[in-house]
């Protein structure tokens, strides 16, 4: 069975007491890519803007297009 998934890969070569050692770290980024795709699709479908309210009831704008309205993305209002 073969499973293909997106990943970050870090490969290290270490020299310890004259001996070579190799270490590899692999991290699955599938969920991150899926979440990024959902956000991208949401932003592309928005008519004017997307406003998110955080747990402190502060609003955050998440649209590149807000520059057209004179707003600064990420600025709290």
Image (spheres, rainbow, N blue to C red):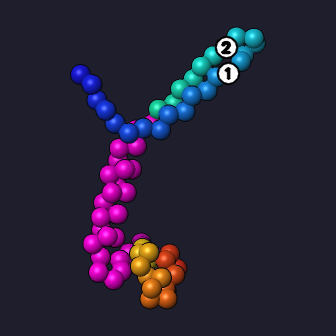
Residue closer to the observer: 23 or 64? 64
Pointers 2 and 1 in contact (CB under 8 A)?
A: yes
What is the secondary structure assignment of the residue under circle 1?
A: strand
Lower sequence index among marks 2 and 1? 1
The residue pinned by badge 1 equals 14
Looking at the picture, does residue 53 appear above or below residue 29?
Answer: below
In the image, what residue occupies the spot 49% across and 86% down?
Answer: 71
Residue closer to the observer: 57 or 70? 70
Does the image show residue 76?
no
Q: In the image, residue 43 lies at what x, y percent?
A: 34, 70
Farthest residue, direction left: 1
Does the image show residue 10?
yes
In the image, what residue occupies the spot 27% across and 25% down?
Answer: 2
Q: Give the distance between the C-alpha atoms of the residues marked 2 and 1, in whole angstroms.
A: 6 Å
Q: Is residue 62 magenta?
A: no
Over which residues does the magenta segment extend? 27-56
What is the secondary structure assignment of the residue under circle 2?
A: strand
């Amino acid at each position: 069975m073969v499973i293909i998934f997106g990943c970050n890969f870090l490969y290290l070569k270490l020299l310890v007491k004259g001996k070579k050692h190799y270490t590899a770290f692999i991290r699955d980024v599938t969920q991150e890519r899926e979440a990024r795709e959902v956000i991208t699709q949401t932003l592309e479908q928005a008519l004017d803007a997307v406003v998110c309210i955080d747990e402190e009831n502060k609003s955050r704008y998440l649209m590149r297009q807000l520059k057209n309205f004179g707003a600064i993305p990420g600025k709290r209002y």
